[in-house]
Image: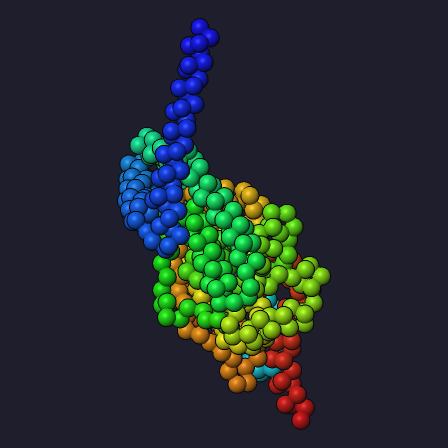
Amino acid sequence: MTDLCEGGMEDLWSIAVVLLQVWFSVMIGFIMIPAMFGLSLGVTSVYIQILVKILEWATLRIERGHRERHTLPVPAPLPFGLIQREGGSMEQEMGELRRYRTQSISRGEFALSDSFYFYIKGLESIVDDQVTQRFSSEELVSWNLLTRTNHNFHYISLRLTIIWGLGVIIRYCVLFPLRITLAIIGLTWLVIGTTLVGFLPNKRLKNWLSELVHLMCYRICARGLSATIQYHNKENKPQNGGICVANHTSPIDIVILANDGCYAMVGQSHGGLMGVIQRSMVRSCPHVWFERSEMRDRNAVTSRLRAHVAAKTNLPILIFPEGTCINNTSVMMFKKGSFEIGGTIYPVAIKYDPRFGDAFWNSAKYNMVNYLLRMMTSWAIVVNVWYLPPMTRREGEDAAQFANRVKSAIAHQGGLLDMAWDGSLKRAKVKEEFKERQQKMYSRSTHTKRSHYLY
């Protein structure tokens, strides 16, 4: 009996070893090697096409269920919020309110009806806060057979339930182990490869090998997310000695962009595993890592970045001027510090397809580990990247105006809402200067006319 048990265990171990060998052979031969050389066998594109067909069928099936039950579906979420804002100036909107008064009031005089302008703005902010909703997951028009959905798709038929169950098995039992294996291999090779390249002298060979190692590793990591990336207008790709600025949705934005070219990263130095990766990367490539104390010194940060840009052989710096992740619907205020450095700015617009997975990192709700687990158990990451023509600061244009011009170009190209609000409101209260700005605007509108009468 003991011999039979031992023989059975040996057979199981043999089968497990064979399956493991097949697993790694398929992964290396059909995924890793093509990824390292930027090739694709077309498997991911076929997978995405099948997903699109399944999601379209699921949407039609749920809509038919609503009709059979004689229920009205909840309208799809509006792209620009519940309230339609005209976007006029304070004086224009106050002028509209004053038109309904029987007693005429000269422009520049105080009117009690002016308080209704601030009253309306306050109610609009309560009902439809434009800022807070940019830090929660983007609402879907249709269910993507993941857990996240909207009120339109509570009805689930037996067929949909079966397909959803099969999807859970595929995502967690097939895709997740494959993806996490690829991610571990990609990061391990990044640390080992960049460390070895760092021992070479600072010559052309070292730069070439460094870029090759970075590209290979990021491409393997991108395959670990089943990423399908479409790059548009490649003739505008960032060049050495320039500054690449992009809207920010997720930490994987770096993987998405570095999958098509090498960049010098900018960020704070960390400890632990992240610190090991940073220290290995900087040995082979001039990345710019700051200590926590240096990050608070604006002049020190600016001078180091200027020194990097001044060397035209250095890789382009990659910066996300929003300073935080926004939910793939909007572009918020760009910090002007990135635009005070000088040099050529290369804008890049990134837009994810939310049907296949929510790429937005809500750092207030999920830590980095939980977020990456959500990414690796989603259907796929489908994203479009647009390289915009390079931009330089115009004569008489300050850094803030230049930042707004670049931000507007990115928002327009990516089909995103262009917002003037600061993304730091995600964690901080409204600055006093914003309140004072509104007070000054109203004061000028009433004081100008009064001063005219005095003179």
Residue farthest toward the right in the current orientation of the protein: 293
Split into 4 quadrants, where in the image is the N terminus?
Answer: top left
For the point 68% across and 72% down, the residue is: 299
The type of colouring in the image is: rainbow
Depicted 398 relative to depicted 377: above or below? below
- Residue 448 on image: x %, y %: 62, 85
Q: Is residue 88 visible?
A: no
Q: Nearer the viewer, residue 28 or 256?
A: 28
In the picture, measured across the screen, residue 121 lies left or right of residue 303, that is left
In the picture, measured across the screen, residue 433 lies left or right of residue 218, that is right
- Residue 117 on image: x %, y %: 57, 68
For the point 33% across and 34% down, the residue is: 163
Split into 4 quadrants, where in the image is the C terminus?
Answer: bottom right
For the point 63% across and 90% down, the residue is: 452
In the picture, measured across the screen, residue 384 lies left or right of residue 87, that is left
For the point 60% across and 70% down, the residue is: 305
Depicted 151 relative to depicted 279: above or below? above
Q: Nearer the viewer, residue 373 or 23?
A: 23
Q: Is residue 393 visible?
A: yes
In the picture, measured across the screen, residue 241 lies left or right of residue 351, that is right
Residue farthest toward the bottom in the current orientation of the protein: 455
- Residue 15 on image: x %, y %: 38, 24
The quarter holding residue 261 reads: bottom left
- Residue 110 on image: x %, y %: 63, 77
The quarter holding residue 111 reads: bottom right
The quarter holding residue 336 reads: bottom right
